[in-house]
Image: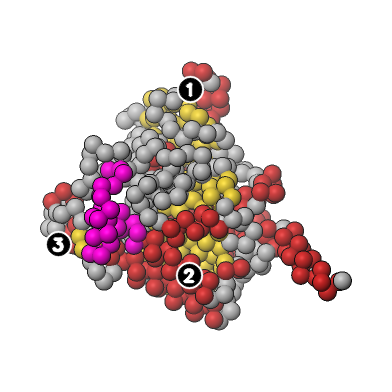
Amino acid sequence: MIKQRLPWLIGMLAFMLPFGMVSASPNIVLILTDDHGWSQLSERMDPRIATSRSRYLETPNIARIMEEGRRFTSGYSPAPLCTPTRRSILCGTSAARSGTEFASPSWIPAEHLTIPKALKMANEDYRAAHFGKWGEQMISTPEESGYDASDGMTGNNTGGMPRTLGIESGNHNDGPPHFIDNEDPKRTPSVTGKAIDFMTEHSAAGRPFYVQVSYYAQHLSVVTRDSLLHKYEQKGRPDRGYTQAWAAMMEELDLGVGRILDTIEELGIKEDTYVFFTTDNGGRGTVPGGDPRATPPNHPLSGAKHHLLEGGIRVPFFVMGPGAQPGSVCREPVVGYDFLPTFYALAGGDPSLLTDEIDGADFVPLLHDRSMANFKRPQKALFFHRPVRRNFSAIRQGDYKLMLYWRDDGAMDRHELYQVYPNPIEEGKEITSDNPELAEELLNRLLAHLYLVGAERKN
């Protein structure tokens, strides 16, 4: 009788183990896409919102992560622009602290705690790699930031921009709406291959690994292969203001994600590996060659890349791995600068050893329904800041979001309060006058954070 019940007892014991005990030093893969909007998937980003998907795009492999793991419907990028987000993810800091534009000369990543440094602090056996787009004007190299292997100081040009594709002016409007590359479009196949080689090497050696796969897609220029372009030409007009070539580039990206997921299974490490998926900012408002009369590419969200409206910072965000309940949904707001403390916790690190610069929260408790009540965000809110080029800051706390607009002289102009859950659309939904006390509370909390981190000002 005992022998007959043993498999059941072992299964129940594994199910009952605290989330962080599933694996003492799990492998972690972070897939970061570029300019990839919240609703630009073939599966609903929010199961309750029909328009949070595209009927035209095909992303079945990305959907595998959603179906086999946990979907965060209120996931955010730290900034509405690529490099501030990448710096923020790397260091676990809000962009207000580590810089809101491409250049941030006062913040040198190598001089601060980073994801690979934190993982090695938790367990010196970790090996870390970064493949794909590092960022623009990051100052420190990946190796200086703690990585053992990388593609180096890569940026937008590495993944294909007009000038590197033969357009002398460097302007997207002066060239064709898309380019053909049948060997390594947008570097997606080669970036994927390097990540696979790294996982294979360290899996064979029995070492835990962390690899960040920073794809160049869906950033412009649009580059795809003939066969996929032909497929979408046969499929007809897109359902939004992107092009058939842009959709083909998205499928190439999805194929790369599929190769990574397949490799994890083939290596037999699925039970010890987490896969996190997100993007560096919201989708673009327009795509070269796209129909301006069509439904906007970021529909249903307001705004797009560069802005702090939801369309600029609410992004795909999901996790699969041990303890992440398949097909589950979490509506608690999370952000890319949460990754560092979360990965550190998964690796068994002592949270008391993290520096005071870390603005992110460990969201490991959110990966399992039963322990959701254990999640605590010390600062109680998410913070966003872009005063120099775009004149705004924002805070998301619970169901609410406040936008703060700055004048050109650096003084505050106005603030607007929105309820972005359950309806994520801001346009026409301002509720400031109906909730003046809440608006004032969020404004003061936002200003306190900006003051605390020494955030840059307009003037």
In front: mark 2 or mark 1?
Answer: 2
Q: Quadrant of residue 61?
A: bottom left
Q: Residue furthest right?
A: 1
In percent of width and height, residue 69 lies at 56, 56
Q: CA distance from mark 3 to mark 1?
A: 49 Å
Q: Secondary structure at mark 3?
A: loop
Question: Which residue shows up at 43% across the image and 42% down it?
Answer: 52
Residue bearing the label numbered 2: 262
Magenta segment: does it hold 246? Answer: yes
Compared with 168, 262 (above or below) is below
Q: What's the amino acid at mark 3?
A: Gly
In percent of width and height, residue 291 lies at 22, 42
Q: What's the amino acid at mark 2?
A: Asp
Question: Which residue shows up at 45% across the image and 68% down it?
Answer: 260
In front: mark 2 or mark 3?
Answer: 2
Label 1 near label 2: C-beta < 8 Å?
A: no
Q: Secondary structure at mark 1?
A: loop
Disc number at residue 195? none
Q: What's the amino acid at mark 1?
A: Ile
Assign the N terminus to one quadrant of the image: bottom right
Residues rendered magenta in the picture: 225-252
Q: Residues within 10 Å of mark 1 (few under 14, many from 20)?
A: some
Question: Which residue shows up at 34% across the image and 71% down it?
Answer: 190
Residue bearing the label numbered 3: 166
Label 1 near label 3: C-beta < 8 Å?
A: no
180 to the left or right of 346: left
In percent of width and height, residue 142 lies at 42, 66
